[in-house]
Image (cartoon, rainbow, N blue to C red):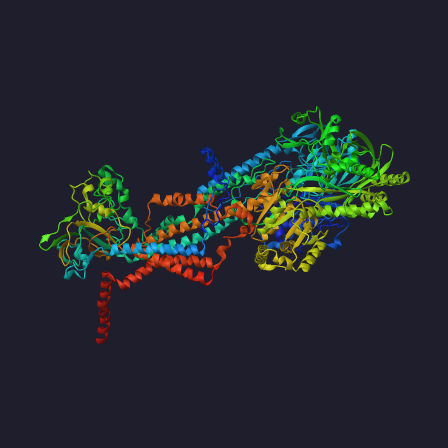
Amino acid sequence: MTSGQPLLQSSDPSASSQPCPSCGFGSLGCLCSNDSFSSSIINDPQGNLFGLDCLEKGDKDLSVGDTRFHSSVGESFGSVETTQQFHSVETPRIERLSLECPTHENKRLGSSVVHAKVGSRALSSLHDNKSQRKSRHKSSQFDDNVLCEEDARFIYINDPRRTNDKYEFTGNEIRTSNVWENCVLFPLLFVLCVTAIKDGYEDWRRHRSDRNENNREALVLQSGHFQHKRWKKIRAGEVVKICADETIPCDMVLLGTSDPSGIAYIQTMNLDGESNLKTRYARQETSSALSEGCTISGLIRCERPNRNIYEFTANMEFNRHKFSLSQSNIVLRGCQLKNTDWIIGVVVYAGQETKAMLNSAASPSKRSKLESYMNRETLWLSIFLFIMCLVVALGMGLWLARYKDQLDTLPYYRKTYFTHGKDYGKRYKYYGIPMEIFFSFLSSIIVFQIMIPISLYITMELVRLGQSYFMIGDRHMYDDSSGSRFQCRSLNINEDLGQVRYIFSDKTGTLTENKMEFQRASVYGKNYGGSLVALISCRKRTFRKFCNCSVSFTMEVISTYEFAAAAHRRWKLKSSIAVDPKLMRLLHKDSVGDERIAVHEFFLTLAACNTVIPIRTCDRSSSCAESQCHEDVETIEYQGESPDEQALVAAASAYGYTLFERTSGHIVIDVNGEKLRFDVLGMHEFDSLRKRMSVVIRFPNDDVKVLVKGADTSMFSILAKDNERDHHVRHATQCHLTEYSSQGLRTLVVAARDLSEAELELWQCRFDDASTSLTDRATKLRQTAALIECDLNVLGATGIEDKLQDGVPEAIESLRQAGIKVWVLTGDKQETAISIGLSCKLLTMDMEQIIINGNSENECRKLLADAKAKHGVKTSDGGNRNLKCNKNAEIDYLEISEGKKEGIVKVPLALIIDGNSLVYILEKDLESELFDLATSCKVVLCCRVAPLQKAAIVDLIKSRTDDMTLAIGDGANDVSMIQMADVGVGICGQEGRQAVMASDFAMGQFRFLNRLLLVHGHWNYQRIGYLVLYNFYRNAVFVLMLFWYILCTAFSTTSALTDWSSVFYSVIYTSVPTIVVGTLDKDLSHRTLLQYPKLYGAGTIYHLAKSPTYWLTILLIIVIALLPRFLFKVVHQIFWPSDIQIAREAEILRRGPDHLRPRLDGRSS
Amino acid sequence: MWGGSTSSDSTRVRSIPIRSGQCKAFLSQFKQQSLPACKPVLTPAWVIAIHLLLGFVFIPIGLVTLHASRGVLEIVDRYDADCVPEEFKGNKVSYIKDTSVPKNCTRILKVHKYMKAPIYIYYQLDNYYQNHRRYVKSRSDQQLLHGLKYNDTSSCKPEESNNGLPIVPCGLIAWSLFNDTYTFIHGTAELRVNRKNIAWKSDRDHKFGKHVYPFNFQNGTLIGGGKLDPNIPLGDQEDLIVWMRTSALPSFRKIYGRIEEDLEADDVIVVHLMNNYNTYSFGGKKKLVISTSSWLGGRNDFLGVAYIFVGSSAVILSLVFLLLHVKNPR
């Protein structure tokens, strides 16, 4: 496929695909930004312009080594489909190249033009390295609703052979192990060996886990039956059946599910970190065809593999119908099927091309910054060593030249054998002066080689081991609740913890516990939950170990009120909520007042108006552990898309309104032991425009009601206005809402309304129409919703707490005092992110928020420019960018360290940016703009970011500053960020172990970060810094001592010490004490360090080398070290002249006339 | 001041009476890195005080050592140039190489002050690189101990063997054995010079064999220095042992013997010496040194001067700090 014999038949559609050597790395580099070629080939009769161009480039650049670049040009429907595969054999896929096809507006016809752009690759050819790295994180961006014919790939359902006919799509085998890239420069074999063994082991481990993954089995349709097949053998186009709780082996388009309506629930925890269930739909057409049992065949045309996990564009040709597929029709590798018996899907992307794999960046090997500093320093030492050796060699040469004639008679230097025998008269180890100089140079290298601190690397390893021991053993970093200790997974970067300047944090599971809790309720104008008394009569924790080793604990809470019900209740909740007794009492009142009805409806709404699915499991083991042993206790677990809804349903259940069963047609709610069945007539799901959700249900007594819940901003406008009584309630509710939101609670307003028959009929008609409509369904549904979502009676409001982990606000505050910038990168919505930011004190009310959420490049550019202009952020560009950035960071740091005096003058800024704009910003050359803006802000919040965008943001800082970055997260979506950052910290949370596996350090809680950085980081850094400096010092002492001595031994490189002493000097005498100091030394107690976080930033040795004073001092030391000797010599010679000196002077005096004599003679003669 | 940042946030261990408990608590404190520790905070007052103290301790020590060193009397006489007869002044090398020329020479030393026994006699060589790598390596410690039984004497090159026979003791060092001799005459009588026990005891007993006799020594074409009596074992050849302990610097003294009687002031000592050793070829100097000793050893002002220097600079520094501190206190 790599050959340079391009065959391209443009006119023959049957032979549609031909191999086409295409542009490799190099050719992209040489494409300058305006060197564009059009790919709009539809109406272009010469439709091969594109391909030919490729050929030309390809011919030039075929030397890409073993990387093969396939490109198949296919022509059908009058357009050219190109599928490009960049296939690398050795390295994991990191680069996805697409051809540069800038738009030529005039040639752009129809929707078949695609522009896949490769970032700003050509522009940034100056920073080659950087741009390579950058482009790794760039996901290709596609125009919305344009299916890219160019890059489409064809999947023939259940026909893998035909699918793979034109081009062999990647198999489902994955490879994450990378070839050892960690070449240490230093020639000591031992160091190399240790590193090699370590890296080799790690790689082997990765390889093993890959193998396990590849050898898992899935059911694949083979000759009419579903048979087991290994994952790695699965190919694109095959039909795969997945059963409940199984992991999905590759990216598949759903064809059918066990649910007749074609719904499947998946958990995307591994991809985006969200633990809730997401719904995916099989197209009705395929789903019904499947249930009828006919053979499935069809054609899917989808976009090239890309990284964007929130986007999927494809269309499907099935039974001569053509329909579009979207994100909701695809299930991705790594997700888990939940709550659905089985699904059947067709593989579209397999192996390395799956979105999950494209999102996992190759794990880079991390090296501590101190170590790279050390390497640089070692280079200087080598130069110093070289100079010393040169001096010795030169001295040797001079000495030999001076005593050239006496070399045999010198008793201490005999160059010839004078003993009788076979050697008589031969030279003894003497090869002439030049060679002697050379040998002397070599031997002095041997003598002085201790200057190069090779043993330091070993010492540092040992010290880090000791430090890790203490970090792991630290009781203050032990998480009681999960029983997880601190883990040091990487031994290389302990000291980097002491230099962190940026923290990138995930939100869900890291800052928050990922548990929503129903905290407050305002019902009918009354505030409940203010003094939440948990009526917990018996509270027991039982730790149960399941076979899958996950520890879960249940808390059984039985309130006094529940006791009565408990007798006949045969189920219980998985989690429990503390209830407000007042509200409880109200519910159990028998009076039939307005308030009572409102409360009733309030909880009904909570229980009914949602998309939560109750899952009942028979759970005997837990109940037997309890004191009161119920037989066959059913546990109800709620699973749904939104954790908020789960919390609300759970809360309703605690107050006696238990959602018991949900199907698409009806729901069953257990109201205080009485099971009521409600018919669901229709549901308007939550959308971001309406910001509310409504459900139309028919009560058992044939009443029809609309139950609505939504954000307060969107709800108050559609409430009924006329009612005097409601006015009061509304006002009170509004007051309560402000109170709740100021406490950082997420608020929702609950309202309801009766529906008359006429209204119902009208609505039902419109609703049916809209929900089956093929075009603009969303808009039509929205219009329908507006029909009934009006004139509502407010029932109340809820306040849900997204529970922060313990001590998060405090930790963030002290980290900030320590001069560390905390950025939050989350997959959540913007509003959620802001509210969390507020509740964890990341954002404060006095901050000015800059919100950037553009939908196009220009919009983003404008927003950025506006923000910068408004807040006076200086643009730093050109050559001195880095310098300025440093300065910027420095200034910020000073600002922080000088307290908040400055803050009064300058309003602290907070930047909130969403993932959509990040796509444009990071892709285009707006990066620097963003960087300027972001670094001048106190807080940066990024919401809706994809895993790889997180890494790109980290890289943004990492590549533009020297500052150390730390990423902390708990989910698989944080892995790339954790790997990208200088220091990666994983939280052992509920979201699997991927983050921990990828991290350098792992711990149980976010707040431990505080101690990790401020105490251990500081200590480690001080210790290692001391160790390194001491090592350089002791080596210098040793070598200089030898050097001065050698000058006294006629430059003959005699060692002043015996061999053993010199070995022990560096191995024992001076290194054992440093190891002890390096592991145990504390310059300040941990209390002091925690109390004064500012101490964290104090003392860096990196910048020491830059200051001229440092070098001046070094020079001074050398001079002063020599001074006494020469001073002594001079003084001695002046005041106490030796006999020799006198003799010599006398000689000179005597010779003086001799010198003059010839001259005199000459004159006289 | 001291322990200004004592990290003794730990609860005191002492309150736990049981020993094992104490041990356990200690261990856990160690693991938590919360053992009581102190780190001196160097406040100006402390620095000044420490410097002053240093000065006050060091200066007296320096004075005492200097005094002791000054009490040592030393007579140094360079004789290499003066012992060359007038006719050879122009070509000293030919003088020393000419075996027919008598090498005896007479020097007269005057004792200025009373010298108390034991009086040590040294010879001093200057510009003699006994520390040259080629020289230092050219010996075989095993052969010195075991004699001919030890064959592997390749380290002794180029003085390893002669006429195919091994040399004992081999090597350049032994080959270039110093061979000037001195006889001292005080008044009319010869001063008795004790030449026993001038080498290290460990060298005599453990480094040089008691039953190793010189063999084939100084038989080459080039004679480097003294010859050895082949009937005396190496362990008793103390001149050789002294010589074989090579010096560290190019200018060195080696002990020759001891005079075990006091010398009065204004005594005149006549030294008859045999000026055999060739230092003329490389411009080395030879000196005869007669010195008494003190509890510090020979005359060496360095230690005393160093003490005084460090002590006085500490005092000066403390004064400077004091001034600075008074001028702009923190």
Q: Quadrant of residue B112?
A: bottom left
The residue depicted at 21 percent of the width and 67 percent of the height is A1150
Direction from residue B210 to residue A75 in the image, left or right: right
Front-most of A193 and A527?
A: A527
A802 in relation to B249, above or below: above
Give how far across and how far down residue B43 sits, in percent.
45, 55
Give how far across and how far down residue A367 sits, in percent.
53, 46
Q: Quadrant of residue B82?
A: bottom left
Residue A271 visible at all: yes
Direction from residue B97 to residue B154 in the image, left or right: right
> What residue occupies the far bottom of the structure in this picture?
A1164
Residue A26 visible at all: no
Front-most of B221 and A229?
A: A229
Give how far across and how far down residue B143 sits, in percent.
24, 40
> What residue occupies the far left of the structure in this picture?
B188
Give how far across and how far down residue B191 sits, in percent.
12, 51
Q: Quadrant of residue B144?
A: top left
A392 in relation to A636, above or below: below
Direction from residue A5 to residue B252 in the image, left or right: left
> What residue occupies the far right of the structure in this picture?
A758
Front-most of A754 and B225?
A: A754
Q: How many marks?
A: 0
Front-most of A550 and B94?
A: A550
